[in-house]
Image: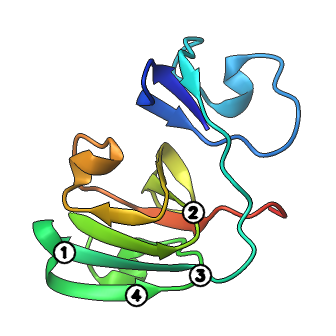
Amino acid sequence: MLYEHPNYTGHQYFLRRGEYPDFQQWLGFNDSIRSCRIIPQQCGSYRIRIYEREDFRGESMEFVDDCPSVYDRFKKHDIYSCIVNDGHWVFYELPNYKGRQFYLRPGEYRRHTDWGSVNARVGSFRRVRENY
């Protein structure tokens, strides 16, 4: 995972195994990369619970697989909090795994700013696995 600013902040870019000769190959907004981290490979289950409100309130739904359209499955455009129980996940701003990306490792995210987003809009999300 590449980050635009130091300390894992700013635009995030999830790169799969491969070569990237310039920032346009990973759909970067610019060529500035100031920090990065390796995402550990997951050998086991994946589980995430999303909520319609901050602090794990309101309607919720649990997922164990990728979700190409949050609205089609959750009937909401926004996710305000979530709990990643198992595995590592990437939220995408738009459906079908497009737009800004946000990496979530196991833990609690009480509000959308906890995963680095300026708003709660999540269009899709997927599990981080080696084989895609």
- Disc 4 versus disc 3: distance between alpha carbons? 9 Å
User: Which dot marks residue 88?
Assistant: 2
- Disc 4 versus disc 2: distance between alpha carbons? 15 Å
Q: 87 or 26: which is nearer to us?
A: 87
Callout 1: SS: strand
For badge 4, the amino acid type reads Glu
Callout 4: SS: strand
Instruction: From the image, state whether disc 2 or disc 3 is nearer to you.
Output: 2
Q: What residue is drawn where x is 59% and y is 75%?
A: 66
Image coordinates of residue 112 in percent, x first then y, are 24, 53
For badge 1, the amino acid type reads Glu
For badge 3, the amino acid type reads Asp
| Residue beneath disc 1 | 52
For badge 2, the amino acid type reads His
| Residue beneath disc 4 | 62
Q: What residue is drawn where x is 75% and y is 74%?
A: 43
Callout 3: SS: loop
